[in-house]
Amino acid sequence: MKTKIGIGIIGLGTVGSGVAEILLRNGDIIKRRLGIPLEIVRAVTKDTGRPLPEGLNPAAVGTDAMQVIENPDVDIVVEVMGGIEPAKSYILRSIENGKHVVTANKALLSLTGDDLFRAASQRGVDLYFEASVCGGIPIIKALREGLSANRIESMYGIVNGTSNFIMTKMTQEGKEFKDVLKEAQELGYAEADPTFDVEGIDASHKLSILVNIAFGTPVNLKDVYTEGISGIQPLDIRYAEELKYRVKLLAISKMKDGSLEARVHPTLVPCSHLMSTVDGVFNAVYVTGDAVGHTLFYGRGAGSLPTGSAVVGDIIDIARNIQSGSCGRIPPASFKEEHRIALNILSIDDIVSMYYFRFTVIDMPGVLSKIAGILGDHKISVASVIQKGRKEGGEVSLVMLTHEAVERNVKSALQEIDSLSFIAAKTVMIRVEEGK
Ligand code: NAP
Ligand code: HSE
C-alpha cells in the first residue's frame, strides 16, 4: 500500500507553476479525496532564478530533467515544458521507466500522439492529456468516458483562447489586433510562438486530438484544413454583427456518409447560437452524439490555474488508478488500438457550407446581376444581399449570404468574379455554420 504518490514536474512556466500552486494550495482536500498525499518530489525548469510558486521547496527545484525521469520516488511525470524535442524523448524515457505521464503538449500529441499512446499501453502505464485541449474544460474525459455510449456525429469547438480573446476584444472594444495579442501574451494565454494561435495551428492540433478520440481514427495534421484569424478585418466583424452573426475561430468535425470533415477557420455563427456567446479566453465544445443529442462544454481555455486544474485532475485520476491497481484501464486514444479505423478526411473543396461574401465593387448598374449570374452558373444560391453605401462610380461593399454550396464551386465562382473589371479588391469569403 502506497502512503504517498510522488510527482515530478518538467517545466515551471505558466502551466507548471499553476500545477505546483494547486498541488500545494489544495493538498489537504486532494488528500481527503485520495486518502494519501501527492508530493512534489522534484520540479525542473531552465531558469531557477525566477520566483517559485509559493510554498514550493527550493531544494526540490533543479534544472536537469533526468532528476525527474530517473527518480525512483517519482510515480507521475508531468511534462509541461512544451515543444517536440526533448519533450518526446523525456516522455518516452519516463514511460520506459514505468512512470505514468501527464502532458499538456498538444503540438506533440497531434504530431506523434499515437506513438506515445502505444508506448504507454505496452508498458501498462497511464498517459493523460486533459490540459492539451481547452485548458480547464474536461472535454477529453467527457469524450473518453461520459459520452462513450455514443456515435459522435459532430463537434464544433472554440478551442483557442488567444484567438477568441482577440476576436472578442476587436468586436466589443474595437481594439487593434496587435494590441490584444500582446495582452494575451502577457496573460500567459499565447503559445511560445503566437503564430500557432492566430494562424489556427494550435486549434488544428487540438481538433486532431479531439477527432482521434471521438471517432477512433488516426489523424494526419496535413488533412486538417487550417486557416486562422489574422486576415479578419474589423469591417467584416461589423457587417456580420449587422446580419446577426459573430465571427469565431471554429474547429469543426462532422461525420458525413462515412467520411469525416476536420477543419479550422473563422466562421460566422448566428447570434442566437450558444457558441456565439463564448467570449474572451473562454472555450467551448458543442458535441452531438446519436444518443445524447446536443451537449455543450464551457470554461476557461488557457491560463495558469485553469490549465493547472486539468493537469492536477489527471494526476488525481492516475493516483486513483495506482491505488486500485487499474492503470491502463482506459485506452489513451479512447478506442482499443486494434479497433481503430482510418477514416477518410474530406478535402476542404468537397465540403458543403453556407458562405458570407464581401465584394468590393465599383458602384454602377448591372454589377449585382453579373455577380448573381456567375454564382448561379456555379450552383450557388444567394440567401440575402446588402449594398453598404452608395457612391456612383466609386467603391462600395456588396455583402452576400448564400445557401449551402460546394466549396469547389465557390472557389471557381470567386475566381471568375474577381477577374471582372468592376471588382476593386479580392473578395472576402467566410464560411457560415448554423451549428446544428
Ligand atoms: P511556458 O510558460 O513557456 O513554460 C515552459 C517552461 O518549461 C519554462 O519554465 C521553461 O523554462 C521550461 N523548460 C523549457 N525547456 C526545458 C527543459 N529542457 N528542461 C526543463 N525545463 C524546461 O509554457 P506554458 O504556457 O506553461 O506551456 C507549457 C505546455 O502547456 C505547452 O505544451 C503548451 O502548449 C501547453 N499549454 C499551455 C497552456 C497555457 O494556457 N499557457 C494551456 C494548455 C496547454 P524557461 O522559461 O527558463 O525557458
Ligand atoms: N495558446 C493556447 C490558447 C493555450 O490560447 O488556447 C491553451 O491551449
Image (cartoon, helix red, strand yellow):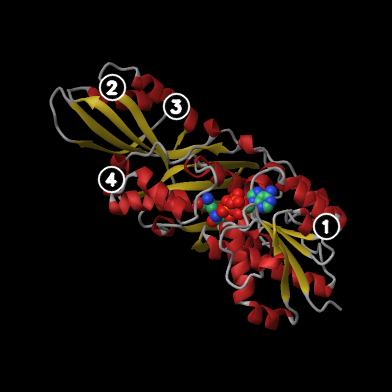
Q: CA distance from mark 4 to mark 3?
A: 24 Å
Nearest the camera: 122 or 216?
A: 122
Alpha-carbon neighbours of circle 1 within 10 Å: few (<14), some, or many (≥20)?
few
Nearest the camera: 198 or 211?
A: 198
Residue 188 position, x and y percent, is 50, 55
Disc 4 designates what residue? 238
Q: CA distance from mark 2 to mark 1?
A: 65 Å
Dot 4 or dot 3: first in sequence order is 4
| Closer to the eye: label 2 or 1 | 1
Label disc, if present, on residue 411 of the rendered structure: 3
Q: Amino acid at mark 4?
A: Arg
Q: In the figure, residue 257 lies in which quadrant?
A: top right
Residue 83 position, x and y percent, is 64, 45
Dot 4 or dot 2: first in sequence order is 4
Disc 1 designates what residue? 70
Alpha-carbon neighbours of circle 3 within 10 Å: few (<14), some, or many (≥20)?
some
Q: CA distance from mark 3 to mark 1?
A: 55 Å
Q: Amino acid at mark 3?
A: Lys
Residue at horizontal 68%, vertical 60%?
Answer: 144
Q: In the rendered view, would you say 278 is above or below 220?
A: below
Residue 294 position, x and y percent, is 53, 61
